Image (cartoon, helix red, strand yellow):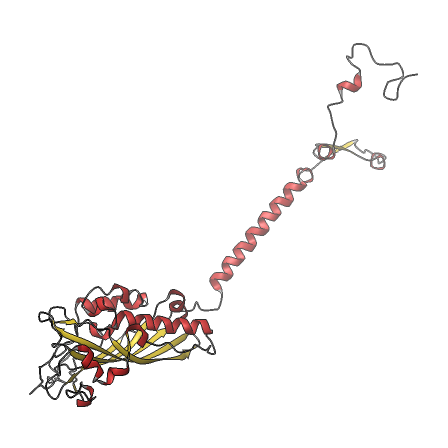
Amino acid sequence: MTGRGDPPEGTPEGVPGGGEDEYRSVVFDESFVRAARLQEFSADERMGEHARAVRSRHAWARAGASRQAVALVLLIAIAFAAAVYMGVRHPYQTPQPQTVEPLHSSVVPLAPRGEVPGGPPDRLFRNSPAAEFRTGAEGVTVPGARRTQSFSESQVMTALTTAKDYLVKSAIDPGVLAGGPVQAVRLLLDPAQQTQFDQSFQHPVDDGRHAATGWLNRFNPAEVTLADTPVRVRGTLTVIERSAATLEVAADHVFVYALQPAHERGPDHASLFTVRRETRFRFDRDDLRDHHLELVQSTVLAGPQACAANASGYLRPMLAGQSAKGDAPTGTDPYTTGGTTVSLCGVLAPGTQPAADGRS
């Protein structure tokens, strides 16, 4: 009896290895059947009159997966085009970047009524109102930070510490005070203010915008030098939320320096020079993130200093033994067009100078 796969007469002669081995490599899977160009009608379809045995399959029928891929690509393209269109035509306006206000500054010299007292720095400080001031950066105290309606406690603290950093670098750093490089101060400013800062040092002018001494305290090293004594400092820092996008720090500090002539060093030739500086710092969220600030206002009272002194580039202190007899501010011409230079001058109260007899 023959096996299940053999024909009744057995395997035909001349067929090597049997017919089953010859067609074993041919596999009619589902994809092969679907890809066939001809498809046999079913038995019911063949019973119809003039029915054909087979029909041709349409190319789309053979490529169902391809149709799905093309449809998916078209759908993605339409969605992308719609997103681009909506992005261009959306009704909301792009928020405008916040503008940075330029610095407005004033530097008012305070002229002495008599001769400037001189002597050893420690005695001068001991007999002056600065006797109880702290020294150096310790005098710029930072209050406790509290969150505001729109800013966190850490953001408020960042504003306060950045303001302190600016005050230390601009009014206490010995290199800056001696007329040295000011890059450390510049880098703390918002980049939008740095051009005005550079112009103030390249061409200082007492016009309320471009005085170098509106940005920082410094002395001409050819005229005076700092005595070997730390700067005495006292002042306050306060925080105000100006808007939901802006913090403001108000600083009010008094800096007292012991100075002596640049070419005449000695313990008995020092004198005190006092600078009262009121400043307003502004911070937007980018400034807080980048450790920058905007210096928007600076008011400086400095003396003893002659009214006629040009203090736009350097502060011009009067030293021990000098007096301001006959000194008066220069006139201001209201008919002059263009940039207006307003000459202001004050009188240094006698009680602000060290007492010669040891009393303040």
Residue 78, position in %: x, y? 56, 53
Q: Is residue 230 left or right of residue 333?
A: right
Rendered image quadrant of residue 223: bottom left
Q: Residue furthest left?
A: 326
The x, y position of residue 126, in whole percent, is: 22, 82
* Viewer-nearest residue: 297 or 166: 166
Q: Nearer the viewer, residue 187 or 217?
A: 217
Residue 183 visible in the displayed image = yes
Identity of the residue drawn at 28% across and 64% down: 184
Residue 233 falls in image quadrant: bottom left
Position of residue 249 measured from the top left corner of the image (x, y, whole percent): 36, 77
In the image, residue 358 above or below residue 290: below
Question: As drawn, is 259 to the left or to the right of 145?
Answer: left
Rendered view: 115 above or below 162: below
Residue 249 or 68: which is nearer the viewer? 249
x then y, percent, for residue 255? 25, 78
Quadrant showing the C terminus? bottom left
Q: Is residue 99 visible?
A: no
Q: Residue at x 67, y 41 (%)?
A: 64
259 vs 3, left or right, is: left
| Residue farthest to the right, as pictured | 1
Relative to residue 42, is residue 160 drawn left or right? left
If the image is split into quadrants, where does the N terminus sit?
Answer: top right
